[in-house]
Amino acid sequence: MRIASIFAVGGLALTAAACGEAPKDDNNAGSGAKKFSACMVTDVGGIDDKSFNASAWKGLQEAKAANDNIDIKNVVSKAQADYEVNLSGFVNQKCDFILAVGGLMSDATKKIAAANPNQEFGIVDANPGLDNIYPMQFDTAQAAFQAGYLAAGLTKTGKVATYGAVPIPPVTIFMDGFVDGVKYYNTSKGKNVQALGWNKETQKGSFSNAFDKQDEGRKVSDALVAQGADIIMPVAGGSGLGTTAAAKASGGKYSTIWVDVDGCESTPDCAAIITTVVKNIPDAVKEAVVKAAAGDKLPAKPGFVGTLANNGVSIAPYHDFDSKVPAELKAEVDKIKADIAAGTITVTSKAQPTK
């Protein structure tokens, strides 16, 4: 999932550059057929959040590359009050498919979709439960479980940590999986690695209260480091960049695990990122838009749920840490993937999407 740099342009819509290559397949190019418009509304994290908004936009770009009869554009929400306005704007522009990104947009998307039952919507990281909204959700607890086990196997202090942006299901699902992975390591190895920043039982923990404020993310991770954590997984979008940058500057005092998009391909802080709990948002979005453009119905039930078994979630390569992760630990993490996919290990979270 190589993420190219993405630059947002002011104004309502950002249109992608026209594809200069001839189509490889008969995909209506040059036929004079009406263009299929796929329009995306970001949440407040913005288009270049190195996370889920960037991933969704990449999916739209890949859909256009697969079928150049697809037109794509986006609008960036500056505040939550923009969600309904921006979604309505694309309804008024008669977009064929409107994509909302992020769990924070669930209520606004449900409201606008209910008012426009003949309009086709999609949403990443939520399921508002309407027939005209195609939900794309990801059981990231499964891959985060691997990451928690990995962190527990690498820590030198015996303390690892996670924190979120806000306590919503697309965030806490990562945190649940991470702490359970640490717990599984402790049970398997007879160890007592502590997972700071989140209590799965009480669903209480540490939050930056923003997806777009690096200083706030840095404050939370500084507090966790002060408590002894030497590996931290921020689930906070752009706020987490405050943590990865500080970890990189720490000279190895602590390291991080990124989420959503491979941090070594989307951030400048690869040297401090052990791995990433990846959501394969680009493929899910691409497939949905290509199908919709072909006239296929996108069923709200069951929608799409990404798992380890269908490659909808995964952990990224170890990159700079490859030589630092013992072969035995790598093998154990790989076996956990196989066991979860096979159902031998069951990963649970209150935030898991329904299948």
Image: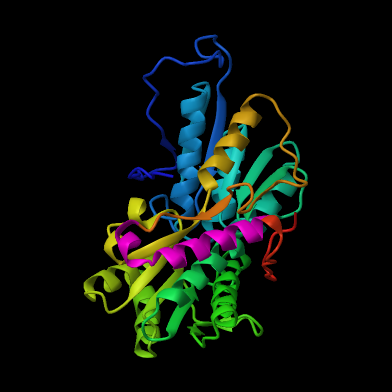
- Furthest residue toward top: 31
Instruction: Report whether 117 appears left or right of 112.
Output: right
Query: With respect to residue 19, does 41 lie above or below?
Result: below
Residue that lies at the very extreme toward the front in this rendered image: 328
Residue 128 highlighted magenta (yes or no): no
| Residue 243: % across, % down | 34, 72
As for residue 328 lying within the magenta part, the answer is yes
Q: Position of residue 24 (x, y in %)?
A: 48, 16
Q: Is residue 23 left or right of residue 108?
A: left
Q: Is residue 269 visible?
A: no
- Which residue is rendered at x = 71% and y = 28% of the image? 296
Q: Is residue 340 above or below residue 2?
A: below
Q: Which residues are magenta?
A: 319-341
Residue visible at 46% across and 16% down?
Answer: 23
Task: Name the foreground residue: 307 vs 71.
Answer: 307
Give the image's coloring scheme. Answer: rainbow
Q: How many marks?
A: 0
Name the residue located 53 percent from the left edge and 48 percent from the top edge: 280
Point out the image quarter for the C terminus: bottom right
Q: Please tell me which residue is depicted at 39% across the width and 24% down the height of the picture.
A: 18
Q: Can the viewer see residue 21 in this picture?
A: yes
| Quarter placement of the N terminus | top left
Q: Main secondary structure of the magenta part?
A: helix
Q: Give x and y (percent) for residue 148.
A: 51, 72
100 versus 36 height, above or below: below
- Report x, y in % for residue 155: 40, 79
